[in-house]
Image (spheres, grey):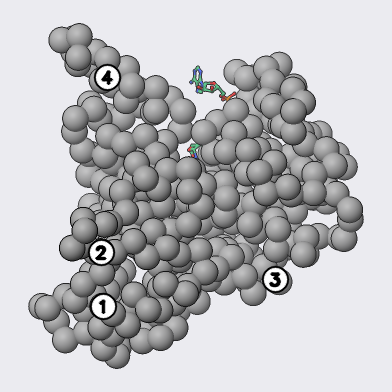
Amino acid sequence: MLKKKPAYRVAVVGATGAVGAEMIEVLEERKFPVEVLRPLASSRSAGGTVSFQGAELSVKLLTKGSFEGIDLALFSAGSDVSKEFAPIAAKAGAVVIDNSAAWRMDKDVPLVVPEVNPHDLAWHKGIIANPNCSTIQMVVALKPLHDAVRVKRIVVTTFQSVSGTGKEAMDELMEECKDLLGFKQPRPKVYPYQIAFNCLPHIDEFLSSGYTKEEMKLVHETRKIMGDSSIQVTATTVRVPIYIGHSESVNIETERKLSPNEARAILSTAPGVQVYDDPAHAIYPMPLDVSGKDDVYIGRIREDESIPNGLNLWVVADNLRKGAALNAVQIAELLVR
Ligand code: 25A
Ligand code: L14
């Protein structure tokens, strides 16, 4: 854990990015005991400022010496930065909570969602990994059902917003919309194809198997977080022209039968979950409503009538908050408790 102190010296690496900015906001909003906040980024934004608790803090260039005196370092600057600098921060005495894919499957690094496996924090060795955004919202929804009836198999299709890729991708969607409304041809840079008014079944790199890395994160990270290597998972991840909020169609096969009403009852008392499910009144979660919210929203709970023990769910969460920054800060809160 972290040594008990009245307040902590916190570094945010990637402080000017989509997730880093949200981390700073969430630290402030949840009144995390911060003695000093040190925003770090690349040379592109070093020298700029970020605001925290009413003060303008200057963004410093990330260097090997950045972690002197730091208790806690939140990383969200991509895998390459995390691979190089997380061990340096840990060696300097900081506990690292890393939002990239760099350390998630390392056997010495716990991969933690506070509602699901807080106990795994006990064995960290200086680096703790924050899971992939799509995995986080799925396991928050499925853990209570797994505890009740054991989930044997998951078939998931995601509808992921562009903020998952970062700020440049959010700008690209806006520029493409403007171009198209002005009858101009969009010129995609971040994504391989136009994302405005389109969807791309392609997130992260393709592997020789035909799956993408993003799809395989859902397979491997789910098993690690749930602590059950027997869960079968297959995924299709799709980028959709939405700014914030990932949606998922989740089909599960369970060992014992669970009716939709039983599932609703279990989920309505589950931590971090809101059930938003009233088809008669067209109530179901949508990214536009869930953006800016902390919980994982679940609707469209219904029986999969094609198998004996099957259930379908629609799961939506703010990918920058529960999918990234909020989950990281919740881990930090557990460390200082
Ligand atoms: O490798 P991964 O794990 O797959 O992650 C890849 C990227 O995904 C985002 C994050 O992008 C990350 O860089 N990300 C990671 N996990 C995520 C998650 N769970 C996630 N997104 C959602 N959910 P991002 O754009 O949100 O944040 C980038 C931040 O990282 C800083 N950074 C990058 N390289 C760095 C570095 N910091 C230190 N050292 C490095 N080597 C980056 O700072 C940003 O804070 P910046 O200074 O590079 O960019 C700040 C401004 O500059 C603009 N900009 C970005 N790229 C360019 C650029 N301007 C010109 N040319 C560019 N190529 C940005 O608009 C920003 O305003
Ligand atoms: O956390 O949406 O592994 O492009 C990397 C790519 C998060 C989402 C991760 C995206 C991701 C992301």
| Residue visible at 19% across and 16% down in the picture | 180
Which type of secondary structure does the marked residue at label 2 adopt?
loop
- Crowd tier of the residue under label 2, counting other residues whose Cα lies within 10 Å: few below 14, some 14–19, many 20 or above: few
Quick one: label 4 or label 3, which is nearer the N terminus?
Answer: 3
Q: How many numbered markers are drawn?
A: 4
**Disc 4: which residue:** 176
Quick one: label 1 or label 4, which is nearer the N terminus?
Answer: 4
**Disc 3: which residue:** 123
| Residue visible at 29% across and 64% down in the picture | 277
**Disc 1: which residue:** 260
Q: Is mark 1 within 8 Å of ligand 2?
A: no
Give the Cα distance between marks 4 and 2: 35 Å
**Which amino acid lies under the numbered mark 4 shown in the image of this protein?**
Glu
Nearest-to-viewer mark from 2 and 1: 2
Q: Is residue 144 visible?
A: yes
Give the Cα distance between marks 2 and 3: 42 Å
User: Residue 294: x percent and y percent?
Assistant: 51, 52
**Disc 2: which residue:** 278
